[in-house]
Image (tube, rainbow, N blue to C red):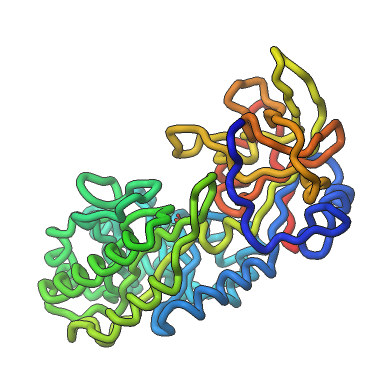
């Protein structure tokens, strides 16, 4: 037997079934028609943002990194809840603007921005988080050609990183950001060229469950920002401090301590160096905002035995939920939180493998999981599906097509 991950708190049962937004999974599947669905809970999104607001200093803005989940109804809901939006492509720019988000609230990071993307961002008045000297010069040229004043922040590749982070995106040689030693000269060049200096972006890592490491990284970010502002010789209008807040996916994972992070930040905001006193601060979160608010629901098509093991074969799989299969940035495959959704409150009584419908041994949703007995027609729920699910999975693979998404 292999344990499954912890089911996020806040899910209710109605008549023994998992319920989301007051509807049982059987009802939800009945309405959805064919195939698996991603169901997202608006109430859980609101609760998450409210908890962040309560724990963190008011001075700290909360940005949503939309690559975690760019579903239009989620963007529209988030627009009223968070302060800013971080995008990483021209496509995401169109999605954000299409969702009615004011371009002044958007910042655009990411290596390898095309000229057309830089132009669209400058024209819309979006802040560009510049990732290299070459990109800075292209953005300045594009601003000149448009007779527009580009809003430019510099993304720093810091010499440190967020300890224990799931994905390494800072520290040492990286395609992201500008090495910290090059920042002062480029910032002065940007200001001298007449662009609007929007400060710095320092992202140190992702998916950390280590509260101490997050507090330490935030301290390092503030210290580095102060030093760089000194070297630049200008106060920082804005500092995007990165994010990195993780969510528990696997057995033994525990949530971060928001209150401790908030208290440490409040302390530091009370003792800022002069050149950060008037700085606007924000963090950028993806999965922490949306990950636990989404569930992937898929129906069992077949139940079979092989060499003494039970297989529950579903109509879903890695083409919708690549991360749950263990093939999106993990080294050792572990089970996400899964449940038999229409028997949510039933006792576990057998060990089964839950697989998808694709012809590849990679397509596993749960290995040797202890579950209530399930049969053809029952519904499997995979939790923590609100981030890096629908848009981070190869939905064209094997001709299966995308899953439907609903926000309730
Ligand atoms: C991906 C990304 C995020 C969001 O990461 P999460 O782990 O989902 O919070 C935030 N900022 C940047 C720069 C990113 O690349």
Up/down of 208 relative to 321, above or below: below
Question: Which is more toward the observer, 273 or 2?
Answer: 2
Tell how many labels.
Answer: 0
When asked about the image quadrant of residue 377, the answer is top right
Horizontal arrangement in the rendering, residue 131 relative to residue 63 (left or right): left
Up/down of 346 relative to 316, above or below: below
Which residue occupies 23% across, 51% down?
A: 171
Q: Quadrant of the C terminus?
A: bottom right
Question: Which is more toward the observer, 305 or 376?
Answer: 305
Q: Quadrant of the N terminus?
A: top right
Q: Quadrant of ligand 1?
A: bottom left
Q: Position of residue 115 (x, y in %)?
A: 37, 53
Q: Position of residue 306 (x, y in %)?
A: 72, 15
Which residue occupies 64% across, 40% down?
A: 320
Q: Is residue 124 visible?
A: no
Q: Is residue 352 visible?
A: yes
Horizontal arrangement in the rendering, residue 277 relative to residue 317 (left or right): left
Which residue occupies 28% across, 61% down?
A: 155
Residue farthest top in this picture = 307
Q: Position of residue 313 (x, y in %)?
A: 75, 28
When asked about the image quadrant of residue 299, the answer is top right
Q: Position of residue 125 (x, y in %)?
A: 43, 72
Question: Which is more toward the observer, 213 or 62?
Answer: 213
Which residue occupies 27% across, 54% down?
A: 161
Horizontal arrangement in the rendering, residue 76 relative to residue 302 (left or right): left
When asked about the image quadrant of residue 18, the answer is bottom right
Up/down of 394 relative to 295, above or below: above
């Amino acid at each position: 037997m292999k344990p499954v991950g912890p089911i996020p708190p806040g899910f209710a049962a109605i008549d023994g079934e998992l319920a989301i937004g007051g509807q049982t999974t059987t009802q939800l599947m009945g309405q959805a028609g064919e195939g698996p669905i991603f169901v997202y809970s608006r109430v859980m999104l609101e609760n998450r943002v409210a908890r962040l607001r309560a724990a963190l200093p008011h001075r700290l803005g909360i940005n949503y990194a939309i690559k975690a989940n760019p579903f239009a109804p989620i963007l529209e809901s988030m627009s009223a809840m968070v302060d800013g939006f971080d995008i990483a492509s021209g496509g995401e720019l169109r999605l954000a603007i299409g969702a009615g988000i004011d371009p002044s609230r958007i910042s655009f990071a990411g290596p390898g921005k095309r000229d057309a993307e830089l132009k669209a961002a400058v024209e819309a008045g979006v802040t560009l988080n510049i990732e290299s000297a070459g990109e800075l010069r292209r953005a300045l040229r594009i601003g000149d050609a448009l007779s527009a004043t580009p809003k430019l922040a510099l993304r720093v590749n810091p010499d440190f990183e967020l300890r224990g982070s799931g994905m390494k995106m800072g520290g040492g040689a990286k395609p992201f950001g500008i090495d910290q030693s090059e920042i002062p000269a480029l910032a002065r060049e940007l200001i001298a060229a007449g662009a609007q200096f929007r400060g710095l972006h320092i992202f140190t890592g992702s998916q950390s469950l280590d509260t101490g490491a997050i507090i330490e990284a935030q301290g390092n970010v503030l210290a580095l920002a102060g030093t760089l502002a000194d070297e630049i010789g200008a106060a920082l209008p804005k500092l995007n401090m990165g994010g990195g807040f993780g969510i528990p996916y696997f057995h033994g994972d525990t949530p971060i301590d928001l209150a401790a992070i908030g208290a440490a930040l409040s302390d530091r905001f009370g003792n800022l160096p002069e050149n950060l006193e008037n700085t606007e601060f924000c963090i950028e979160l993806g999965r922490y905002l949306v990950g636990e608010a989404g569930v992937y629901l898929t129906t069992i098509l077949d139940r079979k035995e092989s060499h003494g093991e039970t297989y529950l074969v579903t109509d879903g799989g890695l083409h919708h939920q690549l991360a749950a299969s263990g093939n999106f940035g993990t080294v050792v495959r572990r089970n996400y939180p899964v449940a038999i959704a229409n028997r949510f409150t039933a006792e576990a009584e057998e060990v089964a493998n839950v697989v998808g419908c694709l012809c590849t041994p990679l397509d596993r949703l749960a290995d040797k999981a202890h579950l209530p007995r399930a049969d053809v027609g029952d519904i499997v729920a995979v939790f923590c599906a609100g981030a890096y699910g629908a848009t981070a999975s190869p939905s064209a693979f094997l001709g299966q097509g995308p899953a439907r998404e609903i926000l309730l």
